[in-house]
Amino acid sequence: MFADESNARLLPNPLAMAAGTIVARYNVQHLRGLTHGDLHTGNVLLQRMQQGELLPQRFRFVDLTTFDISAPLTRDPAMLLLSIVAGRIPLDARAQEELFDQIVRGEGHHELFAPLMRSIRDIDGKLISDDFREDWINQLPLSLLATALLYCTFSNLDERTRWWFFRLAARCAAEYLQVTGSWPTSNERPFMLGLEDMGGFLMSPARP
């Protein structure tokens, strides 16, 4: 539970999910393939016409040091999405909740994130065949969880932004566990976390 939320509800600890302390009832059958591995907005280049018009169909990926021939295919969409979200998190608590719902369950009508989530969840069935759609939807919250926890460690983000990403990770964990029937709806002794608990997430500066 989070101390600064008016409608606080029980959520799983995403760090316990990452450590394997909280697990679902079955192994994840997930889709794997070629992935960039660090697909944020700075690693996507778009061609621009002399008149200034962007040509999104003519894109290039750069910085392929994290390229993997067999990684979860939901990893890149999750990373790209949250790199866009990072600079657009609203200050209003209600707007933050709406953004959580938009990302975790694809619910909402945000002018930017609604169409992005529609594409990522492949609502129109243009990317994922029906045979693998359930696998894609089940593994997506796990990739979002992992990416959100990664963003909690970025020192170039302010404390409140990192806190928002931790809360997002908890909601992604709950979404996955609820879908698999693995998460209890009550707990006699829940922990209450607040913004002051974010300090331990920062990674030490890299040595030269």
Image (cartoon, rainbow, N blue to C red):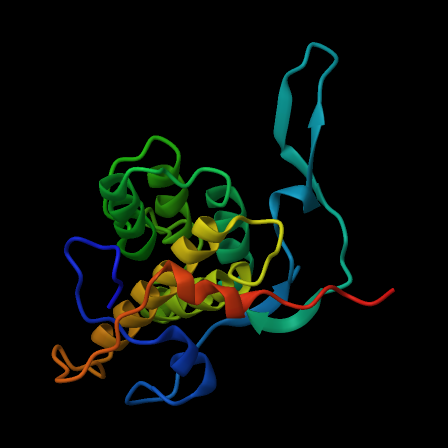
Q: Which residue is drawn at 73% across and 64% down?
A: 205
Residue 180 lies in quadrant:
bottom left
In the picture as drawn, the residue positioned furthest to the top comes out as 51
Measured as percent of width and height from the top left, residue 182 is found at 23, 84
Residue lying at 49% horizontally and 45% vertically, measured from the top left: 86
Quadrant (top left/top right/bottom left/bottom right) for the N terminus = bottom left
Q: Is residue 68 left or right of residue 138?
A: right
User: Relative to residue 74, is residue 60 depicted above or below?
Assistant: above
Examine the rendered structure and indicate whether residue 112 appears above or below residue 163: above
- In the rendered view, would you say 8 is above or below 111? below
Is residue 129 shown to the viewer in this render? no
Taking the spot 48% from the left edge, 48% from the top edge, the residue there is 81
Residue 188 in the image: state x and y as whole percent.
12, 84
Q: Where is residue 15 in the image (x, y as percent from the top left)?
A: 43, 77
The percent coordinates of residue 40 (x first, y second) are 61, 49
> Is residue 119 or residue 90 the one in the foreground?
90
Query: Is 155 positioned to the left or the right of 99 in the image?
Result: right
For the C terminus, the quadrant is bottom right
Seen as rendered, the residue at the extreme right is: 208
Residue 139 vs 23, above or below: the answer is above
